[in-house]
Image (cartoon, rainbow, N blue to C red):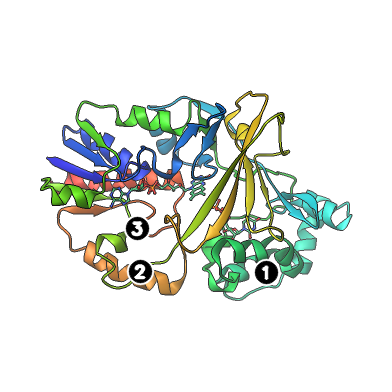
């Protein structure tokens, strides 16, 4: 089969490789001038490896997905740590026992920390929104200090307007584990994401065409037996039911000369100050040694490239209208964060792409 794949991110590249291995002829097209989608990393002009579209930390509990990607990269073990600034002080985040002890000048044991959360939490019969999730687990004061304003900034919405799944990404801990993730596999591609994608796409059956919109290719009469689409689903259908909201970010990259280390951990969150949500210093993530450093600040915006689907009932209802059209397509597969309108992490996109390929191969 001749297969056209729109998008060279995780979704498109995994599909490309798998279908190429099965002997199909693959053309991958991306409108950007690079592969790797939002996971793209590149050396900046000061020779520091940065993530152009914000910090990407790989983590998964799936041995299958970790082994799959291990065909294309070696790894550098890395456990991400985040601290949240409240009233000018940095605290471990997600909230753990040390956060409580430092914030309230306490000396709680693990058991006492559990009792503390039990005392301050506002139990909810139904946990439907992100506000419910946080109040139900840590109560109002921690909600207001760490979650309320960060969420308003990140999404332009109150936590009560967002589905539970958004805040449920963040655990609450009674121990002193200060890792952001607790997955079995936590690592960064040793030579970066872009190098991993280069290996994935390096196959005699794969051609990659960059800086090209697939609609231009269609206009030029490109032919295919099957299309895999990883862009925004509403755009595919020319917004016929209206625009699906996606949240965007403006990334402000900065290089700091004569600063070997800017901050104590990979990412520092600023829930209550500034217009950006967080600052990431890449050298923590990549392990690169360099006498200077590079950081990025993330400013959430309503307009701009689509980065996040916005999990709300009304958006999901609109998505379903598009999905009902997608389900009727015989020769088109929709996969990935934008096409499925799902708040996927990278590993989940790899899993979704592998499943999508299985379905295509079964059907043909
Ligand atoms: P994308 O990477 O968005 O790829 C889609 C591609 O399709 C794009 O390159 C786009 O240019 C192309 N395209 C769209 N329409 C067209 C068209 N008409 N013609 C041609 N090309 C087109 N996940 C984690 O697991 N860990 C993290 O730490 C993490 N951090 C993140 C931080 C930020 C700031 C963001 C935004 C995301 C983060 N993610 C993280 C999520 C991760 O980026 C995504 O899960 C993953 O990159 C999605 O891959 P994808 O292939 O579905 O989409
Ligand atoms: N969040 C918050 N305060 C923080 C960090 C996260 O309120 O300091 C909430 C916020 O709503 C955010 C969500 O938890 O959008 C998920 O956070 P995560 O770090 O997983 O977001 P991502 O890395 O995907 O942007």
Instruction: Say which label, 3 or 2, has the lower sequence index.
Output: 2
On screen, residue 131 versus residue 316, left or right, reads right
Say which quarter of the image contains residue 260.
top right
Tell us which disc is closer to us: 2 or 1. Answer: 2
The residue lying toward the viewer, choosing from 236 and 310, is 236
- Position above or below: 224 against 136: above
Residue 5 is at least partly visible in this image: yes
Which numbered disc, 1 or 3, marks the residue that appears first in the sequence? 1
Q: CA distance from mark 2 to mark 1?
A: 32 Å
In the depicted view, which residue is nearer to us: 83 or 64? 83
Disc 1 designates what residue? 135
Q: Give the alpha-carbon distance from disc 3 to disc 2, as whole Å.
A: 14 Å
Q: Is mark 3 within 8 Å of ligand 1?
A: yes
Please provide percent x and percent y for residue 205: 19, 30
Residue at image mark 3 = 340
Q: Residues within 10 Å of mark 3 (few under 14, many from 20)?
A: many
Q: CA separation, marks 1 and 3?
A: 29 Å
**Tag 3 secondary structure:** loop
- On screen, residue 215 versus residue 250, left or right, reads left
* Residue 210: percent from left, percent from top: 29, 39
Residue beneath disc 2: 243
Tell whether 330 sits left or right of 315.
Answer: left
Count of marks, rendered view: 3
Q: Secondary structure at mark 2?
A: loop
């Amino acid at each position: 089969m001749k297969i056209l794949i729109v998008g060279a991110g995780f979704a498109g590249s995994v599909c490309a490789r798998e279908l190429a291995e099965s002997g199909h002829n693959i053309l991958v097209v991306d409108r950007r001038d690079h592969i790797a989608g939002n996971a793209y990393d590149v050396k900046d002009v000061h020779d520091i490896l940065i993530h152009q579209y914000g910090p990407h930390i790989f983590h998964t509990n799936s041995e299958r997905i970790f082994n799959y990607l291990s065909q294309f990269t070696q790894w550098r073990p890395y456990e991400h740590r985040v601290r949240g600034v409240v009233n000018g002080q940095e605290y471990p985040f997600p909230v753990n026992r040390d956060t409580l002890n430092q914030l309230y000048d306490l000396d709680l044991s693990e058991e006492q920390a559990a009792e503390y959360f039990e005392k301050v939490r506002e139990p909810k019969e139904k946990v439907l929104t992100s506000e419910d999730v946080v109040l139900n687990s840590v109560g109002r004061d921690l909600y207001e200090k760490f979650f309320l304003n960060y969420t308003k900034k990140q999404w332009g919405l109150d936590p009560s307007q967002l589905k539970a799944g958004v805040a449920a990404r963040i655990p609450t801990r009674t121990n002193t584990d200060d890792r952001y993730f607790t997955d079995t596999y936590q690592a960064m591609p040793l030579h970066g994401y872009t190098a991993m994608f280069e290996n994935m796409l390096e196959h005699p059956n794969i051609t990659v065409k960059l800086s090209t919109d697939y609609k231009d290719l269609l206009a030029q009469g490109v032919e295919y037996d099957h299309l895999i689409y990883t862009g925004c689903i509403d755009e595919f259908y020319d917004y016929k039911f209206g625009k699906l909201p996606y949240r965007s970010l403006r990334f402000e990259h900065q290089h700091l000369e004569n600063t070997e280390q800017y901050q104590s951990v990979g990412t520092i969150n600023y829930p209550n100050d500034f217009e950006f949500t967080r600052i990431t210093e890449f050298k923590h993530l990549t392990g690169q040694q360099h006498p200077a450093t590079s950081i990025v600040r993330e400013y959430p915006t309503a307009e701009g490239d689509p980065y996040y689907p916005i999990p709300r009932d009304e958006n999901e209802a609109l998505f379903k209208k598009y999905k009902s059209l997608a389900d009727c397509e015989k020769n088109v597969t929709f996969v990935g964060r934008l096409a499925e309108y799902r708040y996927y992490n990278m590993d989940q996109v790899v899993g979704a792409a592998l499943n999508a390929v299985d379905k295509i191969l079964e059907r043909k």
